[in-house]
Image (cartoon, grey):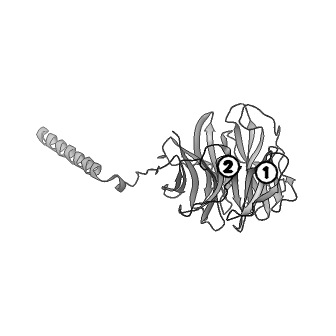
Amino acid sequence: MTGKKKIVSATITLLVCISIILLLNSLPRSQTPLDKTVSHEERWGIYVLDLATEQVELIFSSSKKISCPRLNSAGDRFVFSQKINGDTDEHEEICTINVDGSNFTRLTNNTFWDLYPAWSPDDSQIAFLSWRDTNLDIYKMDANGSNASMLYDSGSHDADIHWMADTIVFTAYSKIWAIKDDGTDPVQITDPPNAGQWGNANLPFGDYDPRLSPDGSKVVFERLWDASSPHGNYDIYVINLDGTGETRLTNSGYSQGFAAWSHTGDKIVYLVAAIDGEGKYDIYMMNSDGTDNRNITPSYFPSNLLCHTAIFSLDDSKIFFVGEWWE
C-alpha cells in the first residue's frame, strides 16, 4: 500500500469511529443497559434492590427519618417506624405500608417514643419498643394499631426485638435475651465480655440487634468488642437459641450490624456503616456460615446515598433497604 493509500485508509477508519461515537451519544440514556440511576425524591426512602440485575426501585419516600422496616410473613407489607410532624424521639411512630408503596397507615399516634416494630408470625400482631415510663419496654398491639399493652419490662432499657414462632429475642443489659411471646420465661442467651462498660463508642460493650433464624433455632447478632472509636468496632456472631455454639462470622472489626437472615436461612445480609472511621453505609451479604462475605452495594450508587437496615424479599431474590440522601 502506498503512503497516500495509507493516509486515506486511516482517515476513513477515523471517520467511521467518530460516526459510531456520535451515534452512540445520540441514543437516549435509557437505551444504554449499563446506565443505572437511583430515584431520589425526599431525604429518606424505602428501596428494593434486585440481586440479579442490580436494578433499584424507590417504593416510598419521606422527608422524615424512616427506620427498621420489617416484612410480614405474607411478603406484601412492611411495618416500620417514622418521624412524623417533628424530629424528636416522641415524634417517632409505628406505620405500615404495602411493598408497592400503597396504603400507608399510621398505627400509633401519641407523645411517646415508639420504634423498632416486629411482626408476629401470623401477621396479626406487632411487637414494638415504647418509652412510656422510665425506660424503653416491649409492647404489643394488634396489626391495625388497637389494643396496645406492655408485654415485658426487664427493669432496664429493652431494645432490638425480633419475633419468630413463640419466641421474642431482644437486647437488655447489653446482652441477648429471649422471652415467650406472652412475655414470660426470660432467658439470657449471650454473656459478652465487659458487657455494659462504656468506652468511646456510642454504645457500651455488648451484644445487639438479635435476629432469629427462619426455623427459630439460631440467633445472629453483632458484638461491640472495641470501643476506642466513636463508631465502635463490631463483628457478626451466630449462636444457638439455647446459648450454645457461639460462632464468630466476621473478623474485620468494622462498624457493622443489623444482620438479617434470608428466608431459606442460608444467607445473611447486614450493614457496614464505617471502616477505620470512614463512613460507608454499604450493604454486605454472606453465607450463614460466614463464607463468601462481600459488598453487594451496586457501584453506581452515589456516595451521598447511605444504606440502612437491609432485609430479604420473600423469595430472597431482592433486598429491601432504607436509603438516606445525605445533605
| Earlier sequence position, callout 2 versus callout 1 | 1
Classify 282 as above or below 103: above
Residue 152: image quadrant is bottom right
Residue closest to the far right: 185
| Side of 103 relative to 232 (left or right) | left
The quadrant of the picture occupied by the N terminus is: top left
Q: CA distance from mark 2 to mark 1?
A: 20 Å
Let me know if residue 211 appears in the view: no
Comparing labels 2 and 1, the label whose residue is closer to the camera: 1
Q: Position of residue 147 (x, y in %)?
A: 75, 63
The disc label shown at residue 137, or none: 1
Give neighbour class at mark 2: few <14, some 14-19, many 20+ (Cα, 10 Å).
many
Residue at the spot of label 2: 258
Q: Position of residue 254 (x, y in %)?
A: 66, 39
Q: Nearer the viewer, residue 133 or 29?
A: 133
Let me know if residue 87 appears in the view: yes
Residue 51: image quadrant is bottom right
Number of callouts in the render? 2
Classify 10 as above or below 109: above
Q: Amino acid at mark 1?
A: Asp
Give neighbour class at mark 1: few <14, some 14-19, many 20+ (Cα, 10 Å).
many
Q: Residue at x 67, y 59 (%)?
A: 266
The disc label shown at residue 252, or none: none
SS class, disc 1: strand
The answer to whether marks 2 and 1 mark residues whose Cβ atoms lie closer than 8 Å is no
Q: Position of residue 211 (x, y in %)?
A: 72, 55
Q: Residue at x 70, y 51 (%)?
A: 114
Q: Position of residue 84 (x, y in %)?
A: 60, 50
Q: Residue at x 79, y 61 (%)?
A: 167
SS class, disc 2: strand
Residue 202: image quadrant is top right
Q: Amino acid at mark 2?
A: Phe
